[in-house]
């Protein structure tokens, strides 16, 4: 059975997929003026968790998540795309 945190992650990922379909990008604004500021915060958290993972520190990021986000065209850093794979 999938954990609650995994279900939350999957739900946010689906929101990001929808955002990408509508806006043709994965860079989600975090300002309160946009319709879903919590999605922008989630995107920032994925970037932060990815960088922690790259540094060998404790992180909730997994290779499976990296692959899913890469397949979506996720930007790991503004201005450049980095990947472990």
Image (cartoon, helix red, strand yellow):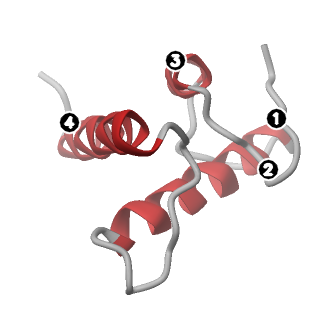
Q: CA distance from mark 1 to mark 3?
A: 17 Å
Q: CA distance from mark 3 to mark 2?
A: 19 Å
Q: Position of residue 57 (x, y in %)?
A: 76, 48
Give the residue pinned by disc 2.
77
Q: Pointer 4: residues within 10 angstroms few (<14), some, or many (20+)?
A: few
Residues under numbered marks 2 and 1 in contact, where contact means CB atoms less than 8 Å apart: yes
Q: Position of residue 23 (x, y in %)?
A: 44, 45
Q: How many marks?
A: 4
Give the residue pinned by disc 1.
81
Q: Position of residue 18 (x, y in %)?
A: 29, 38
Q: CA distance from mark 1 to mark 4?
A: 29 Å
Give the residue pinned by disc 4.
3
Quadrant of the image containing the N terminus: top left
Q: Nearer the viewer, mark 1 or mark 3?
A: 1
- The image's mark for residue 64 is 3
Callout 2 secondary element? loop
Residues under numbered marks 3 and 2 in contact, where contact means CB atoms less than 8 Å apart: no
């Amino acid at each position: 059975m999938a954990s609650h945190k995994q279900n939350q992650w999957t739900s946010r990922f689906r929101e990001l997929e929808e955002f990408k379909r509508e806006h043709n990008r994965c860079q989600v604004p975090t300002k309160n003026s946009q319709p879903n500021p919590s999605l922008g915060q989630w995107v920032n958290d994925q970037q932060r968790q990815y960088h922690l993972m790259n540094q060998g520190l404790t992180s909730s990021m997994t290779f499976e998540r990296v692959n899913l986000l890469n397949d979506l065209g996720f930007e790991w850093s503004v201005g450049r795309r980095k990947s472990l794979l």
